[in-house]
Image: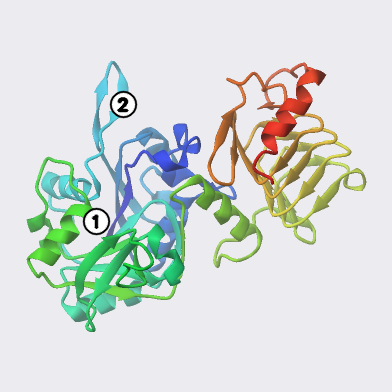
Amino acid sequence: MKAMILAAGKGTRVRPITYTIPKPLIPILQKPVMEFLVELLRKHGFDQIMVNVSHLANEIENYFRDGQKFGVQIAYSFEGRIVEGELIGEALGSAGGMKRIQDFLPFFDDTFVVLCGDALIDLDLTQAVKWHREKGAIATVVMKSVPREEVSSYGVVVTDESGRIKAFQEKPSIEEALSTDINTGIYIFEPEVFNYIPSGIEYDIGSQLFPKLVEIDAPFYGISMDFQWVDIGKVPDYWRAIRSVLLGEIKNVSVPGREVFPGIYTGLNVAVNWDKVEIIGPVYIGAMTKIEDGAKIIGPTMIGPNCWVCSGATVENSVIFEYSRLGPGVRLVDKLVFGRYCVDKIGASIDVQAAALDWLITDARQALPSQPPEERQAIDDILRHSDN
């Protein structure tokens, strides 16, 4: 069976991570989110997968290659061009990306599934496809019911008693919402849907194709299913996803490494004197990371591989990416450290290099920076500004 993963977006709401990592490759405890999607598709018999790519396309293609090592076949559709030897992404929109593949040579010749490449899901795709076919639908949106107080964060889907879609509301107020069923970005289509997608232009599934299907009264349905769906649309979503995995709240996603103490997991060759540090789980520490004596780590916290946490540093409820060096006495609470950026849990970031603060948070591969003591209080105040 055939499927498509949408992977061409720039992921602007997940910056600074997506400056160098495409959204589908954002790691969930060292494993890219798109890899979980490929595994789900394979589990339900979808072994021919198209992926549209644009922003940082080479990164995605070099990781997944032809899909052989994942037990599937994968092909790519690049959206963009080369300018002075550099790939410039020019995404065609979700529907436009589908149409480009079909125009090249009709690939989608039967019922197919389309997934956004930036969500952790645990969904019975087989059941969803069965329901879609029984309805005789040209398109089906897999929906999830959320508490009414959360509807304003999502695209709301309005259906009749048979499941036929009548309208959409984009992030309505709680009072205006006509439903608590939201669009999860998981779609089931028949090839006939391409009759309603124009060629060669940017065209979106949610804002253009779906309203068109409603307008012409096509057999267009929504099915509300009870499944786990962790959308990684923004930096705070990613931060919460890592927390949820460490707390054991996400099915089929386990903490990697070896459990050396209850709730404390490590990769290979972690350098730490357990008697001289304070570590309270759940915590994951990546391979070849050094934790100096006197450091304090409080979970849920992830520290990536090849990091260096200096003496007296405190890391609490935080996500630290690989090759990060946290200087002596630094206190990080509810923070995400990615390269030169320190981000709080609502998404506000500090560029520590631009702020000349890289003596405190820097790349572990660099020579040890000197630390001006008179600046310590100032940076501590900045890094703690969102703790209160």
Q: Amino acid at mark 2?
A: Leu
Using the image as rendered, state which of residue 330 and residue 169 is in the foreground: 169
The quadrant where residue 354 appears? top right
Residue 125 vs residue 298: left or right?
A: left
- Describe the colour scheme in one phrase: rainbow
Instruction: Tell me if mark 1 has few (under 14), some (14-19) or many (20+) residues whose alpha carbon lies within 10 angstroms of its own.
Output: some
Residue 1 seen in the current view: no
Mark 2 surroundings: few (<14), some (14-19) or many (≥20) residues within 10 A? some
Indicate the secondary structure of the residue bearing disc 1: helix
Q: What secondary structure is found at the residue carrying circle 2?
A: strand
Q: Furthest residue to the right?
A: 275
Q: Find the distance from the CA under tag 2 to the CA under tag 1.
A: 27 Å
Q: Position of residue 304 (x, y in %)?
A: 65, 41
Q: Nearer the viewer, mark 2 or mark 1?
A: 1
What residue lies at 47% left-to-right and 37% top-to-bottom?
Answer: 15
Quadrant including the N terminus: bottom left
Residue 206 is tagged as 1
- Percent position of residue 255, x then y: 64, 57
Q: Residue at x 29, y 46 (%)?
A: 75
Of the pair 109 and 20, the residue shown nearer to us: 20
> Is disc 2 in contact with disc 1, using a CB cutoff of under 8 Å?
no
Name the residue tied to disc 2.
87
* Dot 1 amino acid type: Gly
